[in-house]
């Protein structure tokens, strides 16, 4: 697993060559490039790890939690609700 920010896919964005998804990252909606995922676009509700605006890896909820724990060790706090980004 790479070190990245976990995000949950909200939807796929039409156009752009099928390369963009709308992703919930720490409670904020972000447009993320999904073109580097080698096994096609992610499903809505799935977790991805993001680096510099690109989805680099699919993870499950446990993997997203591990990534967030790693970020916390480096000083990145969770949002006030304590939820995963």
Image (tube, rainbow, N blue to C red):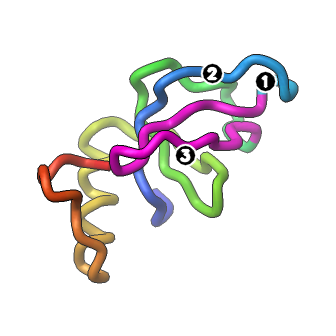
Sequence-first disc among 3 and 1? 1
Residue labelled with disc 3? 57
Q: Secondary structure at mark 3?
A: strand
- The image position of residue 37, as x and y in percent, is 67, 38
List the residue tagged with mark 2.
12
Magenta stretch: give its range: 19-35
Left or right: residue 48 versus residue 17 is left
Secondary structure found at label 2: strand
Which residue, given by chain and number where applicable, does mark 1 sit on? 18
Q: Is residue 29 magenta?
A: yes
What x and y, as percent, mark residue 76? 30, 74
Relative image position of residue 10 (x, y in whole percent)? 47, 25
Q: CA distance from mark 2 to mark 3?
A: 16 Å
Q: Is residue 21 magenta?
A: yes
Q: Is residue 34 shown left or right of residue 51?
A: right
> Furthest-bottom residue in view?
74
Does residue 28 appear left or right of residue 62 in this picture? right
Q: How many marks?
A: 3
Q: Mark 2 or mark 3: which is in front?
A: 2
In the rendered image, residue 46, in percent from the top left (x then y), is placed at 42, 27
Drawn side of residue 73 relative to residue 13, left or right: left
In depth, the one of 39 and 55 nearer the eye is 55
Q: Are marks 3 and 1 in contact (CB under 8 Å)?
A: no
Q: Give the residue displayed 29% in from the left and 70% down from the top.
A: 70
Residues at marks 1 and 2 touching, judged by CB atoms closer than 8 Å:
yes
Residue sticking out furthest to the right: 17
């Amino acid at each position: 697993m790479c070190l990245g920010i976990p995000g949950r896919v909200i939807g796929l964005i039409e156009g752009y060559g099928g390369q963009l998804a709308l992703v919930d990252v720490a409670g904020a909606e972000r447009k993320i490039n999904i073109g580097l995922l080698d096994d096609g676009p992610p499903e809505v509700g799935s977790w991805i790890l993001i680096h510099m605006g690109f989805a680099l890896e699919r993870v499950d909820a446990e993997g997203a939690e591990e990534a967030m724990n790693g970020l916390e060790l480096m000083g990145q706090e969770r949002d006030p609700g304590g939820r995963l980004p």
